[in-house]
Image (tube, rainbow, N blue to C red):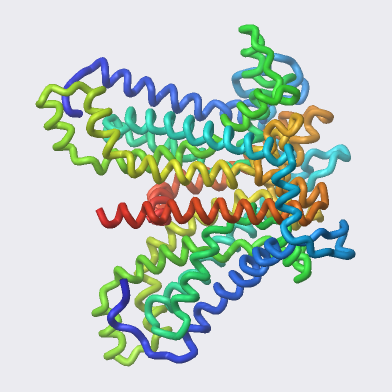
């Protein structure tokens, strides 16, 4: 879409886009270019000499069992965050949809977890499940479950999934609710007159009509699980115990800043960039389609 | 309600209520913990109801932080830093995005679409992906441990530019024509007509970006080494890692409450703008 009426100025438009473009060049393109460049170099720690090594960093990465372990953790983690998050928020949205007119308060009580920083969400859940003072850990002990996320890798992964889902649930809820409220009531009523019960109406009418929103949220949640959960993990487990919660983004940070392996970390950055670009394209292709419906 | 089934209505309310309670539980426990003394918080099980030490605990963290040589600036200082950062990011993003959207929509000039795609590209590269080189650039520019270093790298935003572009495209052309007939310069048109009309979009954007800026974690963690620049979110997380050796859960949880409060209040009180911003950004 374009404007029919525009202004004729020679320099003004450049001045106006200038700040945005300069910041984009300095803090986006330049570092991204450097990441790509560094991914084909091997550098001594702290600068020093660097050597051009073609794709050695990538080959090294693809032969590294630690990297595959991190890929596996990331896949399991994102799957759980997206699946549990979408299922719970859909349940809440469907339940709240019809009552919400009577009680708008529900919405107000469900939107605020979005405002809590992921790192703070991590601290909160860590407190509930803390092996010595955590109230939930204490209750679990009461029914015979020994919960210690500091030493047990699977429990640690479960806990970061819970914290990440909690943080994202209001976002999903709001989009599902908006989707539900845009479904014409006449459709539901017609089905009810034809004798379809609530369950039947949900699976045959509401669910298919919600699938565009659901797919959009799926992509958003995967991007969130990949990149937005750094704070949750750093606050809760720092990737441990024994790398059980080290997702790819955390490994980039760990290898680059703690391990001082610039080449390896940059190669991982480049791979992640390709992943985000692919996900963003999928998301936009989809939005375009939705607009053309 | 399509049909009247009392049982179903009760069930719906029940499910939502249980959901609400589960979602609110971590924050309730945080609040409870922040009102007890240190001794109470060491006995298991910890209490489920608030205690009498609310004012003591908050006064201590606000003015002295953890105290007793375990590091940590007083929380009021980190709150100030977070506020500066959140306001800087939100206002900076809005300012540079609105003028670049204005340029892209209202002018025809060489490389216009190039600029558009360059901005679009930033959408694809979250800070987390290019951590090490971005840190390098900021270090080379001498911006470590400074407010500009905390703010400027985060203010380029494709989403805000798109939002304003979308809005400008919906503004009727007649307004622009009228302004031109009256001999108004482009900037005059921008200030007197476009900007006042964009108020609701700006408010929606502000809520979203303020939360984004306040909740930043990795970025301040990397580029600040001086306590005087720490933000509240990173301080809470840092202190959480020492709390096992210094069992001051009551103080840590008071800090966590203070770190959550400003963005949560904004979301609750500006809910309309918040929901609008969230949905519009994704359009």
Q: Quadrant of residue A49?
A: bottom right
Q: For the N terminus of chain B, which image quadrant?
A: top left
Question: What residue is shown at x 59% (from left), y 69% (from top)?
Answer: A24
The image position of residue B221, as x and y in percent, is 73, 51
Residue B259, can we see it?
Answer: yes
- Left or right: A272 as drawn, with respect to A150: left
The image position of residue B54, as x and y in percent, is 66, 31
A55 over A82 or under it: above or below: below
Question: What residue is shown at x 17% (from left), y 21% (from top)?
Answer: B4
- Left or right: A200 as drawn, with respect to A32: left
Q: For the C terminus of chain B, which image quadrant?
A: bottom left
Front residue of this view, candidates B184 and A178: A178
Q: Return the residue found at the far left.
A: A193
A263 over A226 or under it: above or below: below
Front residue of this view, candidates B283 and A248: A248
The image position of residue B259, as x and y in percent, is 63, 43
B253 over B11 or under it: above or below: below
- Left or right: B272 as drawn, with respect to A60: left
Question: What residue is shown at x 84% (from left), y 64% (from top)?
Answer: A50
Front residue of this view, candidates B249 and A73: A73
The image position of residue B161, as x and y in percent, is 46, 66
Question: What residue is shown at x 34% (from left), y 84% (from top)?
Answer: A6
């Amino acid at each position: 879409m374009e404007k029919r009426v525009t202004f004729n100025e020679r320099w003004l438009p450049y001045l106006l886009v200038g700040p945005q473009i300069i910041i984009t060049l300095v803090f986006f393109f330049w570092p991204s270019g450097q990441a790509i460049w560094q991914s084909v170099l091997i550098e001594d720690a702290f600068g020093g000499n660097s050597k051009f090594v073609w794709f050695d960093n990538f080959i090294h990465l693809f032969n590294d069992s630690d990297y595959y372990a991190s890929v596996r953790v990331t896949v399991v983690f994102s799957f759980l965050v997206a699946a549990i998050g979408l299922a719970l928020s859909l349940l809440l949205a469907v339940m709240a949809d019809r009552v919400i007119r009577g009680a708008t308060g529900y919405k107000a009580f469900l939107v605020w977890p979005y405002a809590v920083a992921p790192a703070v969400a991590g601290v909160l859940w860590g407190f509930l499940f803390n092996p010595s003072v955590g109230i939930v850990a204490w209750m679990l002990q009461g029914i015979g479950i020994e919960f210690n996320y500091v030493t047990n890798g699977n429990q640690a992964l479960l806990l970061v999934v819970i914290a990440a889902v909690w943080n994202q649930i209001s976002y999903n809820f709001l989009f599902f609710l908006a989707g539900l409220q845009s479904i014409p009531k006449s459709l539901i009523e017609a089905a009810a007159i034809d004798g379809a019960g609530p369950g039947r109406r949900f699976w045959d009418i509401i669910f298919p009509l919600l699938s565009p929103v659901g797919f959009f949220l799926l992509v958003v949640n995967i991007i969130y699980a990949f990149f937005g959960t750094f704070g949750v993990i750093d606050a809760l487990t720092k990737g441990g115990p024994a790398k059980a919660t080290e997702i790819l983004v955390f490994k980039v940070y760990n290898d680059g800043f703690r391990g001082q392996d610039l080449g390896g970390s940059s190669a991982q950055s480049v791979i992640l960039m390709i992943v985000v670009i692919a996900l963003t394209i999928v998301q936009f292709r989809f939005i375009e389609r939705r607009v053309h419906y | 309600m399509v049909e009247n089934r009392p049982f179903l209505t009760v069930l719906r309310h029940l499910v939502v209520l249980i959901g609400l309670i589960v979602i609110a539980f971590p924050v309730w426990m945080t609040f409870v913990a922040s009102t007890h003394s240190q001794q109470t918080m060491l006995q298991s099980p910890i209490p489920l109801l608030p205690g009498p030490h609310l004012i003591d605990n908050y006064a201590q963290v606000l003015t002295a932080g953890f105290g007793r040589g375990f590091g940590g600036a007083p929380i009021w200082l980190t709150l100030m830093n977070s506020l500066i950062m959140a306001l800087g990011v939100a206002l900076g993003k809005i300012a540079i995005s609105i003028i670049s959207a204005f340029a892209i929509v209202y002018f025809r000039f060489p490389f216009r679409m190039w600029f558009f795609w360059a901005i679009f590209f930033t959408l694809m590269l979250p800070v987390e992906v290019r951590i090490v080189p971005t840190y390098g650039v900021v270090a080379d520019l001498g911006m470590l441990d400074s407010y500009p270093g905390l703010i400027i790298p985060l203010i380029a935003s494709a989403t805000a530019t798109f939002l304003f572009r979308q809005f400008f495209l919906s503004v009727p052309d007649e307004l622009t024509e009228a302004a031109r007939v009256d001999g108004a310069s482009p900037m005059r048109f921008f200030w007197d007509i476009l900007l006042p009309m964009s108020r609701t979009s700006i408010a929606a954007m502000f809520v979203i970006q303020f939360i984004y800026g306040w909740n930043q974690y990795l970025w301040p963690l990397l580029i600040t080494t001086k306590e005087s620049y720490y933000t509240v979110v990173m301080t809470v997380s840092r202190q959480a890692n020492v709390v096992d050796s210094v069992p001051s859960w009551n103080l840590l949880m008071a800090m966590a409450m203070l770190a959550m409060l400003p963005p949560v209040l904004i979301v609750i009180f500006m809910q309309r703008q918040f929901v609008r911003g969230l949905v519009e950004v994704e359009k």
